[in-house]
Image (cartoon, rainbow, N blue to C red):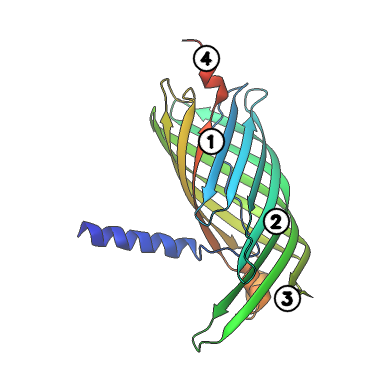
Amino acid sequence: MKTRLFTKLVWLLAGALGPTGCAVYMPMQCAAPAVQDKGQVEATASAYFNSRLNAGVNYSPVRHLVVRAAADGKQDKNDSTYYRSSQYEVAVGTYWPLGKRVLVGALGGAGRARSQARYSVSNYYGYQRQYQFDARYNKFFGEAYAAVQFSPGFSAGAAYRLTQVQFVGLTDLGQPLDLRRMLRGESMFFVRGAFGSGPRGERPLYAQFGFGASRLLNPSGAGQQAGSPEAEVLQGRGYFTVGLGFFPHALFRRP
């Protein structure tokens, strides 16, 4: 019974996230910084389940202010089927501890990306459609997040982004596509387990597991013909990540 229930939950989660494979638009995971006081520096590194990598730094120069820089990429040397990307983002925002257990915050930022993808999709009749995307785009986003500390070593939370994507160049099989921009809603849920001694925010290392999804919000973009290159770009995508967060200041705190 327990195994059957677990299997149903896994399939429900997968269905809620949508396709977890790559496409030409590859959303970065939400930031959800864990900094909560001035002078704190948080360095993060994580891997998506499709071998894409992400790294970021969050810094609070004054209380309630956080600045962020992050990069994300995937290399693929295959020729027949491949997914490649490189992107970065910068952001500034605020955070507010609510008591001893809740941390909320928001930030806004911008970034740039280059993505390339080549793959085939088969329909019900066995016909294969080949896609070969090459995209350059700018993005502008706003994010809100919250985390709850259930114990000194365990927390969980959620984040939500609105991302405006503006394509600088977008082609399929070398032909330009009639798609200039899209607005996407991007949610993420995460759990964190901290290592070391000390209260919340004073442990030097934590591990994080997260899962999220990116879905189209433009009503005008939803009318693309199924199977068209534009529809493939616009469809929803999900992701899973595992990673680490490191607070250098926690190593040098006074006892």
Q: Amino acid at mark 1?
A: Val
Disc 3 target residue? 173
Disc 2 target residue? 164
Give the alpha-carbon distance from disc 3 to disc 1, as whole Å.
44 Å
Residue 197 in the image: state x and y as whole percent: 41, 21
Q: Amino acid at mark 3?
A: Leu
Give the alpha-carbon distance from disc 1 to disc 4, as whole Å.
24 Å
Q: What residue lies at 58% left-to-right and 48% top-to-bottom? A: 53
Sequence-first disc among 3 and 2: 2
Disc 1 target residue? 104
Q: Nearer the viewer, residue 42 or 199?
A: 42
Q: What residue lies at 65% left-to-right and 66% top-to-bottom? A: 117
Q: Amino acid at mark 2?
A: Gln
Q: Is residue 77 visible?
A: yes
Sequence-first disc among 1 and 4: 1
Q: What residue lies at 61% left-to-right and 41% top-to-bottom? A: 55
Disc 4 target residue? 253
Residue found at the very far bottom of the displayed protein: 125
Give the alpha-carbon distance from disc 3 to disc 4, as whole Å.
56 Å
Sequence-first disc among 4 and 2: 2
- The quarter of the displayed image where residue 127 is located: bottom right
Badge 3: residue crowd in 10 Å (few <14, some 14–19, many ≥20): few
**Mark closer to the observer (3, 2):** 3
Mark 4 residue element: loop
